[in-house]
Image: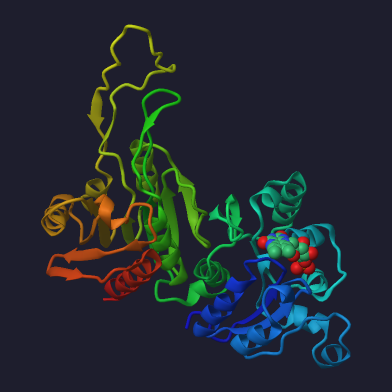
Amino acid sequence: MTLSGKQILLIISGGIAAYKSLDLIRRLRERGAEVRPVMTAAAQQFVTPLAVGALSASHVFTDLFSREDEQDVGHIRLARECDLVVVAPATADLMAKLANGHANDLASTILLATDRPVLLAPAMNPKMWMHPATRRNRAILAGDGIPFIGPAAGEMAEGGEAGEGRMAEPLEIVAAIEGMLGGAAGPLAGRRAIVTSGPTHEPIDPVRYIANRSSGKQGHAIAAALARLGAEVTLISGPVTIPDPAGVRVIRVERAEEMRDAVAAALPVDVAVMVAAVADWRVASTAGNKIKKRPGEAPPPLQLAENPDILKTIGHHRSRPRLVIGFAAETENVAENGRAKLDRKGADYILANDVSPKTGVMGGDRNRVKLIGRDGAEDWPEMSKDEVAEKLAALIAVKLSA
Ligand SMILES: Cc1cc2nc3c(=O)[nH]c(=O)nc-3n(C[C@H](O)[C@H](O)[C@H](O)COP(=O)(O)O)c2cc1C
Protein backbone atom coordinates (compact mmCIF):
# COMPACT_ATOMS: atom_id res chain seq x y z
CA MET A 1 0.00 0.00 0.00
CA THR A 2 2.46 2.58 -1.25
CA LEU A 3 -0.05 5.44 -1.05
CA SER A 4 -1.68 4.59 2.26
CA GLY A 5 -3.31 7.62 3.82
CA LYS A 6 -2.50 9.91 0.89
CA GLN A 7 -5.21 12.27 -0.36
CA ILE A 8 -5.21 12.87 -4.10
CA LEU A 9 -7.34 15.59 -5.64
CA LEU A 10 -7.93 14.29 -9.16
CA ILE A 11 -9.04 16.88 -11.72
CA ILE A 12 -10.51 15.28 -14.84
CA SER A 13 -10.76 17.65 -17.79
CA GLY A 14 -12.54 17.16 -21.09
CA GLY A 15 -10.57 14.83 -23.31
CA ILE A 16 -11.22 11.42 -24.80
CA ALA A 17 -8.63 10.00 -22.39
CA ALA A 18 -11.01 10.74 -19.48
CA TYR A 19 -12.05 7.09 -19.69
CA LYS A 20 -8.56 6.12 -18.52
CA SER A 21 -9.08 8.22 -15.38
CA LEU A 22 -11.59 5.63 -14.19
CA ASP A 23 -8.82 3.04 -14.17
CA LEU A 24 -6.46 5.58 -12.57
CA ILE A 25 -8.90 6.02 -9.68
CA ARG A 26 -9.04 2.26 -9.20
CA ARG A 27 -5.24 1.92 -9.26
CA LEU A 28 -4.79 4.75 -6.74
CA ARG A 29 -7.34 3.30 -4.35
CA GLU A 30 -5.76 -0.18 -4.65
CA ARG A 31 -2.59 1.44 -3.29
CA GLY A 32 -4.38 2.95 -0.31
CA ALA A 33 -4.92 6.51 -1.61
CA GLU A 34 -8.13 8.47 -1.08
CA VAL A 35 -9.26 10.11 -4.31
CA ARG A 36 -11.41 13.26 -4.37
CA PRO A 37 -12.52 13.91 -7.95
CA VAL A 38 -13.21 17.25 -9.63
CA MET A 39 -14.65 17.24 -13.14
CA THR A 40 -14.83 20.07 -15.64
CA ALA A 41 -18.05 20.57 -17.55
CA ALA A 42 -16.37 19.15 -20.66
CA ALA A 43 -15.12 16.07 -18.76
CA GLN A 44 -18.75 15.19 -17.99
CA GLN A 45 -19.34 14.82 -21.74
CA PHE A 46 -16.85 11.93 -21.77
CA VAL A 47 -17.42 10.08 -18.49
CA THR A 48 -20.26 10.45 -16.03
CA PRO A 49 -19.95 11.83 -12.50
CA LEU A 50 -21.87 8.70 -11.48
CA ALA A 51 -19.07 6.39 -12.66
CA VAL A 52 -16.36 8.63 -11.21
CA GLY A 53 -18.21 8.88 -7.88
CA ALA A 54 -18.83 5.14 -7.69
CA LEU A 55 -15.19 4.25 -8.39
CA SER A 56 -13.75 6.87 -6.04
CA ALA A 57 -16.39 6.34 -3.33
CA SER A 58 -16.40 10.11 -2.99
CA HIS A 59 -18.57 13.07 -3.79
CA VAL A 60 -17.68 14.43 -7.24
CA PHE A 61 -17.10 18.20 -7.34
CA THR A 62 -18.14 19.90 -10.56
CA ASP A 63 -19.36 23.42 -9.85
CA LEU A 64 -17.53 26.47 -8.50
CA PHE A 65 -20.80 28.10 -7.52
CA SER A 66 -22.47 25.10 -5.86
CA ARG A 67 -24.04 26.41 -2.66
CA GLU A 68 -23.90 23.03 -0.90
CA ASP A 69 -20.31 22.22 -1.86
CA GLU A 70 -19.12 25.70 -1.03
CA GLN A 71 -20.70 25.51 2.44
CA ASP A 72 -19.46 21.98 2.99
CA VAL A 73 -15.84 21.88 1.77
CA GLY A 74 -15.38 25.03 -0.30
CA HIS A 75 -13.02 25.45 -3.20
CA ILE A 76 -10.13 26.70 -1.07
CA ARG A 77 -10.29 23.70 1.27
CA LEU A 78 -10.61 21.40 -1.74
CA ALA A 79 -7.43 22.94 -3.13
CA ARG A 80 -5.50 22.53 0.12
CA GLU A 81 -6.86 19.41 1.83
CA CYS A 82 -4.82 16.99 -0.22
CA ASP A 83 -1.25 15.82 -0.64
CA LEU A 84 -1.20 16.26 -4.41
CA VAL A 85 -3.36 17.68 -7.20
CA VAL A 86 -3.30 15.46 -10.29
CA VAL A 87 -4.82 16.60 -13.59
CA ALA A 88 -5.52 13.57 -15.80
CA PRO A 89 -6.26 14.10 -18.57
CA ALA A 90 -4.99 17.67 -18.76
CA THR A 91 -6.54 19.30 -21.83
CA ALA A 92 -4.83 21.94 -23.95
CA ASP A 93 -7.52 24.29 -22.67
CA LEU A 94 -6.91 23.66 -18.97
CA MET A 95 -3.15 23.91 -19.45
CA ALA A 96 -3.66 27.26 -21.21
CA LYS A 97 -5.80 28.49 -18.33
CA LEU A 98 -3.27 27.46 -15.71
CA ALA A 99 -0.34 28.90 -17.66
CA ASN A 100 -2.15 32.22 -17.92
CA GLY A 101 -3.74 32.36 -14.49
CA HIS A 102 -7.39 31.98 -15.45
CA ALA A 103 -9.81 30.86 -12.76
CA ASN A 104 -13.26 30.71 -14.33
CA ASP A 105 -14.41 27.27 -13.21
CA LEU A 106 -13.82 24.95 -10.26
CA ALA A 107 -10.83 23.09 -11.78
CA SER A 108 -8.89 26.18 -12.84
CA THR A 109 -9.67 27.99 -9.57
CA ILE A 110 -8.39 25.04 -7.52
CA LEU A 111 -5.21 24.97 -9.61
CA LEU A 112 -4.52 28.63 -8.77
CA ALA A 113 -5.58 28.38 -5.15
CA THR A 114 -3.65 25.26 -4.22
CA ASP A 115 -0.43 25.30 -2.25
CA ARG A 116 0.09 21.57 -2.89
CA PRO A 117 2.27 20.02 -5.60
CA VAL A 118 0.56 19.56 -8.96
CA LEU A 119 1.12 16.83 -11.56
CA LEU A 120 -0.20 17.16 -15.12
CA ALA A 121 -0.93 14.23 -17.45
CA PRO A 122 -1.60 15.96 -20.77
CA ALA A 123 -3.64 14.27 -23.48
CA MET A 124 -4.58 15.77 -26.79
CA ASN A 125 -4.37 15.49 -30.52
CA PRO A 126 -0.71 15.63 -31.69
CA LYS A 127 -1.37 18.83 -33.66
CA MET A 128 -2.76 20.46 -30.52
CA TRP A 129 0.25 19.27 -28.49
CA MET A 130 2.71 20.65 -31.06
CA HIS A 131 0.84 23.91 -31.66
CA PRO A 132 3.02 26.94 -30.85
CA ALA A 133 0.43 28.16 -28.31
CA THR A 134 0.46 24.85 -26.42
CA ARG A 135 4.26 24.75 -26.60
CA ARG A 136 4.41 28.23 -25.05
CA ASN A 137 2.04 27.14 -22.29
CA ARG A 138 4.08 23.99 -21.66
CA ALA A 139 7.21 26.08 -21.29
CA ILE A 140 5.47 28.45 -18.85
CA LEU A 141 4.13 25.56 -16.75
CA ALA A 142 7.51 23.81 -16.73
CA GLY A 143 9.09 27.14 -15.71
CA ASP A 144 6.59 27.33 -12.83
CA GLY A 145 7.97 23.98 -11.65
CA ILE A 146 4.92 21.88 -12.57
CA PRO A 147 5.92 18.35 -13.61
CA PHE A 148 4.34 16.48 -16.52
CA ILE A 149 3.89 12.76 -16.95
CA GLY A 150 3.68 11.95 -20.66
CA PRO A 151 2.19 12.35 -23.13
CA ALA A 152 3.35 9.29 -25.04
CA ALA A 153 3.59 8.84 -28.78
CA GLY A 154 1.23 6.42 -30.49
CA GLU A 155 -2.16 5.93 -32.11
CA MET A 156 -4.83 8.43 -31.12
CA ALA A 157 -8.25 7.26 -29.90
CA GLU A 158 -9.73 9.08 -32.90
CA GLY A 159 -8.73 6.66 -35.66
CA GLY A 160 -6.20 7.43 -38.35
CA GLU A 161 -3.93 9.80 -36.41
CA ALA A 162 -0.72 9.06 -34.61
CA GLY A 163 1.95 11.11 -32.88
CA GLU A 164 2.76 12.57 -29.49
CA GLY A 165 -0.31 13.32 -27.38
CA ARG A 166 -1.59 10.09 -25.83
CA MET A 167 -2.12 10.29 -22.10
CA ALA A 168 0.38 8.29 -20.05
CA GLU A 169 -1.02 4.93 -18.95
CA PRO A 170 -2.68 4.88 -15.50
CA LEU A 171 0.16 2.78 -14.01
CA GLU A 172 2.73 5.29 -15.27
CA ILE A 173 0.75 8.10 -13.65
CA VAL A 174 0.56 6.07 -10.44
CA ALA A 175 4.35 5.62 -10.58
CA ALA A 176 4.81 9.36 -10.99
CA ILE A 177 2.52 9.98 -8.03
CA GLU A 178 4.37 7.42 -5.93
CA GLY A 179 7.63 9.07 -6.98
CA MET A 180 6.32 12.43 -5.76
CA LEU A 181 4.64 11.17 -2.58
CA GLY A 182 5.38 7.66 -1.62
CA GLY A 183 8.84 6.46 -2.53
CA ALA A 184 10.96 7.31 0.48
CA ALA A 185 9.17 4.96 2.84
CA GLY A 186 9.48 1.90 0.58
CA PRO A 187 11.56 -1.23 1.26
CA LEU A 188 14.39 0.08 -0.96
CA ALA A 189 14.63 3.46 0.81
CA GLY A 190 18.30 4.35 1.19
CA ARG A 191 19.40 1.90 -1.55
CA ARG A 192 21.02 3.03 -4.76
CA ALA A 193 20.43 1.36 -8.12
CA ILE A 194 21.69 1.62 -11.68
CA VAL A 195 19.49 0.44 -14.53
CA THR A 196 20.57 0.46 -18.17
CA SER A 197 17.92 0.49 -20.86
CA GLY A 198 17.30 0.75 -24.59
CA PRO A 199 19.60 0.03 -27.50
CA THR A 200 22.95 1.61 -28.28
CA HIS A 201 23.67 3.37 -31.55
CA GLU A 202 27.11 2.74 -32.99
CA PRO A 203 27.97 5.35 -35.60
CA ILE A 204 29.24 4.42 -39.04
CA ASP A 205 29.60 8.04 -40.11
CA PRO A 206 27.92 11.27 -38.92
CA VAL A 207 24.52 10.21 -40.30
CA ARG A 208 24.44 6.40 -40.18
CA TYR A 209 24.58 3.97 -37.29
CA ILE A 210 24.18 0.32 -36.33
CA ALA A 211 21.34 -0.26 -33.86
CA ASN A 212 18.93 -2.92 -32.62
CA ARG A 213 15.19 -3.15 -31.98
CA SER A 214 15.20 -2.58 -28.20
CA SER A 215 12.50 -0.05 -27.19
CA GLY A 216 13.66 0.56 -23.60
CA LYS A 217 10.22 -0.41 -22.25
CA GLN A 218 11.49 -3.18 -19.96
CA GLY A 219 14.47 -1.23 -18.59
CA HIS A 220 12.45 1.92 -18.01
CA ALA A 221 9.73 -0.11 -16.25
CA ILE A 222 12.35 -1.65 -13.93
CA ALA A 223 13.83 1.77 -13.12
CA ALA A 224 10.33 3.06 -12.29
CA ALA A 225 9.50 -0.01 -10.17
CA LEU A 226 12.72 0.32 -8.12
CA ALA A 227 12.02 4.05 -7.59
CA ARG A 228 8.48 3.21 -6.45
CA LEU A 229 9.99 1.01 -3.73
CA GLY A 230 12.09 3.97 -2.59
CA ALA A 231 15.45 3.32 -4.31
CA GLU A 232 17.54 6.19 -5.62
CA VAL A 233 17.74 5.15 -9.26
CA THR A 234 20.09 6.24 -12.03
CA LEU A 235 18.72 5.15 -15.40
CA ILE A 236 21.33 5.10 -18.14
CA SER A 237 19.44 4.94 -21.39
CA GLY A 238 20.38 4.54 -25.01
CA PRO A 239 18.28 6.38 -27.62
CA VAL A 240 14.56 5.62 -27.04
CA THR A 241 11.28 7.33 -27.89
CA ILE A 242 9.42 6.49 -24.67
CA PRO A 243 9.06 9.06 -21.85
CA ASP A 244 11.43 9.20 -18.88
CA PRO A 245 10.08 7.33 -15.86
CA ALA A 246 9.08 9.51 -12.92
CA GLY A 247 11.33 9.91 -9.90
CA VAL A 248 14.46 8.62 -11.62
CA ARG A 249 17.70 10.38 -12.63
CA VAL A 250 18.13 9.78 -16.36
CA ILE A 251 21.47 9.89 -18.18
CA ARG A 252 21.21 9.65 -21.96
CA VAL A 253 23.96 8.02 -23.99
CA GLU A 254 24.32 6.78 -27.54
CA ARG A 255 27.27 4.41 -27.79
CA ALA A 256 28.24 1.35 -25.73
CA GLU A 257 31.47 3.02 -24.64
CA GLU A 258 29.53 6.03 -23.34
CA MET A 259 27.16 3.67 -21.52
CA ARG A 260 30.10 1.86 -19.88
CA ASP A 261 31.57 5.18 -18.70
CA ALA A 262 28.22 6.42 -17.37
CA VAL A 263 27.69 3.15 -15.47
CA ALA A 264 31.19 3.32 -13.94
CA ALA A 265 30.62 6.96 -12.94
CA ALA A 266 27.35 6.04 -11.16
CA LEU A 267 29.06 3.46 -8.88
CA PRO A 268 28.96 2.57 -6.01
CA VAL A 269 25.40 1.24 -5.88
CA ASP A 270 23.61 -1.62 -4.11
CA VAL A 271 22.14 -3.14 -7.25
CA ALA A 272 22.80 -2.91 -10.99
CA VAL A 273 20.21 -4.16 -13.46
CA MET A 274 21.63 -4.27 -16.96
CA VAL A 275 18.69 -4.35 -19.34
CA ALA A 276 20.11 -2.34 -22.26
CA ALA A 277 20.63 -4.23 -25.50
CA VAL A 278 24.23 -3.09 -25.86
CA ALA A 279 25.64 -3.59 -29.34
CA ASP A 280 28.30 -6.31 -29.30
CA TRP A 281 30.26 -4.55 -31.99
CA ARG A 282 30.96 -1.03 -33.11
CA VAL A 283 32.45 0.18 -36.36
CA ALA A 284 36.23 0.07 -35.91
CA SER A 285 36.82 3.56 -37.24
CA THR A 286 33.91 5.94 -37.61
CA ALA A 287 34.16 8.13 -40.72
CA GLY A 288 34.41 11.84 -39.97
CA ASN A 289 32.29 12.72 -43.00
CA LYS A 290 29.32 11.01 -44.64
CA ILE A 291 30.61 8.09 -46.69
CA LYS A 292 29.70 8.85 -50.30
CA LYS A 293 28.25 6.36 -52.73
CA ARG A 294 30.34 6.58 -55.92
CA PRO A 295 29.12 5.17 -59.23
CA GLY A 296 30.93 2.01 -60.17
CA GLU A 297 32.59 1.55 -56.75
CA ALA A 298 31.93 -1.45 -54.52
CA PRO A 299 30.12 -0.79 -51.18
CA PRO A 300 32.62 0.17 -48.44
CA PRO A 301 33.62 -2.74 -46.16
CA LEU A 302 32.55 -2.29 -42.52
CA GLN A 303 35.32 -3.34 -40.17
CA LEU A 304 33.85 -4.11 -36.73
CA ALA A 305 35.51 -3.93 -33.31
CA GLU A 306 34.25 -5.53 -30.12
CA ASN A 307 32.42 -3.25 -27.69
CA PRO A 308 33.09 -3.26 -23.95
CA ASP A 309 31.10 -5.91 -22.06
CA ILE A 310 29.36 -3.69 -19.51
CA LEU A 311 27.67 -6.48 -17.54
CA LYS A 312 30.94 -8.41 -17.22
CA THR A 313 32.82 -5.25 -16.23
CA ILE A 314 30.31 -4.59 -13.42
CA GLY A 315 30.20 -8.27 -12.40
CA HIS A 316 33.97 -8.20 -11.78
CA HIS A 317 34.37 -4.56 -10.72
CA ARG A 318 36.27 -3.65 -7.53
CA SER A 319 33.16 -1.68 -6.48
CA ARG A 320 30.87 -4.53 -7.54
CA PRO A 321 27.27 -3.90 -6.41
CA ARG A 322 25.89 -6.45 -3.95
CA LEU A 323 23.46 -7.59 -6.62
CA VAL A 324 24.27 -7.70 -10.33
CA ILE A 325 21.43 -8.67 -12.64
CA GLY A 326 21.63 -8.99 -16.41
CA PHE A 327 19.19 -9.63 -19.21
CA ALA A 328 19.92 -12.15 -21.91
CA ALA A 329 18.06 -11.58 -25.14
CA GLU A 330 18.22 -14.90 -26.92
CA THR A 331 16.61 -16.34 -30.01
CA GLU A 332 17.52 -19.99 -29.29
CA ASN A 333 18.55 -22.23 -26.36
CA VAL A 334 17.34 -19.54 -23.95
CA ALA A 335 18.01 -21.48 -20.72
CA GLU A 336 21.46 -22.82 -21.63
CA ASN A 337 22.68 -19.53 -23.03
CA GLY A 338 21.33 -17.67 -19.99
CA ARG A 339 23.07 -20.04 -17.55
CA ALA A 340 26.39 -19.74 -19.42
CA LYS A 341 26.06 -15.96 -19.35
CA LEU A 342 25.54 -15.96 -15.56
CA ASP A 343 28.92 -17.60 -14.99
CA ARG A 344 30.81 -15.70 -17.65
CA LYS A 345 29.63 -12.29 -16.54
CA GLY A 346 29.87 -12.74 -12.77
CA ALA A 347 26.17 -11.92 -12.37
CA ASP A 348 23.87 -13.05 -9.54
CA TYR A 349 20.84 -13.41 -11.79
CA ILE A 350 20.12 -13.46 -15.47
CA LEU A 351 16.64 -12.84 -16.81
CA ALA A 352 16.66 -14.70 -20.07
CA ASN A 353 13.99 -13.88 -22.62
CA ASP A 354 13.23 -15.24 -26.03
CA VAL A 355 13.31 -12.30 -28.43
CA SER A 356 12.81 -14.27 -31.63
CA PRO A 357 10.37 -12.36 -33.89
CA LYS A 358 7.43 -14.73 -33.20
CA THR A 359 7.40 -13.69 -29.50
CA GLY A 360 6.89 -9.94 -30.16
CA VAL A 361 9.03 -9.17 -27.06
CA MET A 362 11.32 -6.61 -28.75
CA GLY A 363 9.33 -3.39 -28.80
CA GLY A 364 6.17 -5.10 -27.43
CA ASP A 365 4.47 -4.59 -24.05
CA ARG A 366 4.66 -8.16 -22.77
CA ASN A 367 7.49 -10.41 -21.77
CA ARG A 368 8.10 -13.98 -20.73
CA VAL A 369 11.30 -14.50 -18.81
CA LYS A 370 13.25 -17.23 -17.12
CA LEU A 371 15.00 -16.15 -13.92
CA ILE A 372 18.32 -17.96 -13.74
CA GLY A 373 20.21 -17.81 -10.44
CA ARG A 374 23.14 -19.69 -8.90
CA ASP A 375 20.77 -22.17 -7.26
CA GLY A 376 18.39 -22.84 -10.13
CA ALA A 377 16.00 -21.37 -12.63
CA GLU A 378 12.40 -20.25 -12.43
CA ASP A 379 9.98 -19.71 -15.33
CA TRP A 380 7.84 -16.63 -14.95
CA PRO A 381 4.51 -16.78 -16.81
CA GLU A 382 3.94 -14.30 -19.62
CA MET A 383 3.07 -10.91 -18.17
CA SER A 384 3.33 -7.22 -18.98
CA LYS A 385 6.75 -5.59 -18.84
CA ASP A 386 5.44 -3.51 -15.90
CA GLU A 387 4.55 -6.70 -14.05
CA VAL A 388 7.98 -8.22 -14.78
CA ALA A 389 9.48 -5.00 -13.39
CA GLU A 390 7.38 -5.12 -10.22
CA LYS A 391 8.23 -8.77 -9.61
CA LEU A 392 11.94 -8.15 -10.13
CA ALA A 393 11.92 -5.05 -7.90
CA ALA A 394 10.23 -7.07 -5.14
CA LEU A 395 12.88 -9.81 -5.51
CA ILE A 396 15.65 -7.20 -5.30
CA ALA A 397 14.09 -5.75 -2.13
CA VAL A 398 14.04 -9.23 -0.54
CA LYS A 399 17.64 -10.06 -1.58
CA LEU A 400 19.03 -6.75 -0.37
CA SER A 401 17.32 -7.06 2.99
CA ALA A 402 18.67 -10.60 3.54
C1 LIG B 1 -14.68 14.21 -29.15
C2 LIG B 1 -13.78 15.27 -28.52
C3 LIG B 1 -12.56 14.88 -28.02
C4 LIG B 1 -11.71 15.82 -27.44
N1 LIG B 1 -10.50 15.41 -26.95
C5 LIG B 1 -9.67 16.31 -26.42
C6 LIG B 1 -8.42 15.91 -25.91
O1 LIG B 1 -8.06 14.73 -25.92
N2 LIG B 1 -7.60 16.85 -25.40
C7 LIG B 1 -7.94 18.18 -25.38
O2 LIG B 1 -7.12 18.98 -24.93
N3 LIG B 1 -9.15 18.58 -25.83
C8 LIG B 1 -10.01 17.69 -26.35
N4 LIG B 1 -11.23 18.12 -26.82
C9 LIG B 1 -11.59 19.52 -26.71
C10 LIG B 1 -12.00 19.88 -25.28
O3 LIG B 1 -13.07 19.06 -24.86
C11 LIG B 1 -12.39 21.36 -25.21
O4 LIG B 1 -11.24 22.15 -25.46
C12 LIG B 1 -12.99 21.73 -23.88
O5 LIG B 1 -13.33 23.10 -23.90
C13 LIG B 1 -12.02 21.47 -22.73
O6 LIG B 1 -12.60 21.91 -21.54
P1 LIG B 1 -11.87 21.72 -20.12
O7 LIG B 1 -10.45 22.07 -20.31
O8 LIG B 1 -12.60 22.68 -19.22
O9 LIG B 1 -12.11 20.32 -19.70
C14 LIG B 1 -12.10 17.18 -27.39
C15 LIG B 1 -13.37 17.55 -27.88
C16 LIG B 1 -14.19 16.61 -28.45
C17 LIG B 1 -15.53 17.03 -28.96
Q: Nearer the viewer, residue 217 or 323?
A: 217
Ligand 1 shown in quarter: bottom right
133 left or right of 226 in image: right
**Residue with the most extreme front position:** 160
283 left or right of 97 in image: left
28 left or right of 336 in image: right
Image quarter (top left, top right, bottom left or bottom right) of the C terminus: bottom left
Residue 135 appears in the rendering: yes
- On screen, 356 above or below 31? above
Image quadrant assignment for residue 364: bottom left
Which residue is at 70% across, 83% downward?
Answer: 49
Image quadrant assignment for residue 284: top left
x and y, in percent, of residue 4 in the image: 53, 85
x and y, in percent, of residue 133 in the image: 77, 48
Which residue is at 82% across, 89% downward?
Answer: 69
**Residue with the most extreme top position:** 296
- On screen, 246 above or below 22? above
Which residue is at 31% across, 47% downward?
Answer: 277
